[in-house]
Amino acid sequence: MTRPPLLDLLTEREAAAGITAERLREQIATLTDQLTAAETELAELAITRKTLLSLTGHADPAAPTDATVASPAYQQILAVFHCATAPMRAKDICHTLGTGTTTKDTENLRAKLKRLVARQILTEPEAGLFTLASPPPAA
């Protein structure tokens, strides 16, 4: 018994869609790796700048006066947000920073993000989604 031509067409379309989906998954994986590398480099450069300024005795005019926010952990988090193009979730930031993504890791980061929200450095436009706060309007 032969298969109807319509089923042959459907099989061909399924195979083509499967190949396209796999190619797109590979592209997404490659782009994700590239984005992670770029964001990591940005965070490392921010830390290097801070270290060099500290060693030379020069003050960084952009450095926060809040000791908590000035810590390396918070500076890495902020560096991620400075190059982000959209609001991010705690798990995505953990991924970008190369830290663990277990519940413990994401909750620890979420607590830091909430502290930054309380200091009005970040905003939380919707539950669990964080972004940089808009600068206050010039007087």
Image: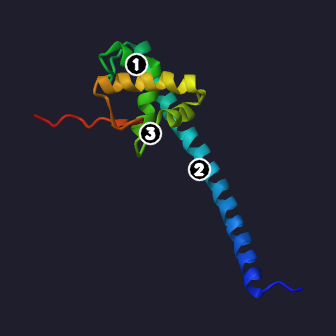
Which circle's residue, 2 or 3, is located before the other in the chain? 2
Disc 1 crowd rating (10 Å Cα; few below 14, some 14-19, many 20+) is: few
- Is 27 left, or right, of 56 in this rendering? right
Which residue is painted at 44% across and 13% down in the image?
A: 55
Give the residue type that dot 1 points to: Leu
Q: Residue at x 45, y 26 (%)?
A: 110
Measured from the top left, where is residue 95 in percent x and y?
57, 34
CB atoms at circles 1 and 2 under 8 Å apart? no
Q: Is 102 situated left or right of 9 in this image?
A: left
Quick check: 25 left or right of 132?
right
- Numbered circle sitting on residue 31: 2
Give the foreground label among 1 and 2.
2
Q: Which residue is mark 1?
A: 53
Q: Which mark is residue 15?
A: none
Quarter of the rendering occupied by the C terminus: top left
How far apart are the alpha carbons under marks 1 and 2?
Answer: 33 Å
Disc 3 residue type (three-letter): Met
Kindly state the secondary structure of the residue where label 2 is placed.
helix
Q: Tell me which colouring the rendered structure shows.
A: rainbow
Q: Going by the image, does 2 lie left or right of 16? A: right
Q: Is residue 48 visible?
A: no
Can see residue 80? yes
Who's the residue at 45% across and 34% down the image? 80
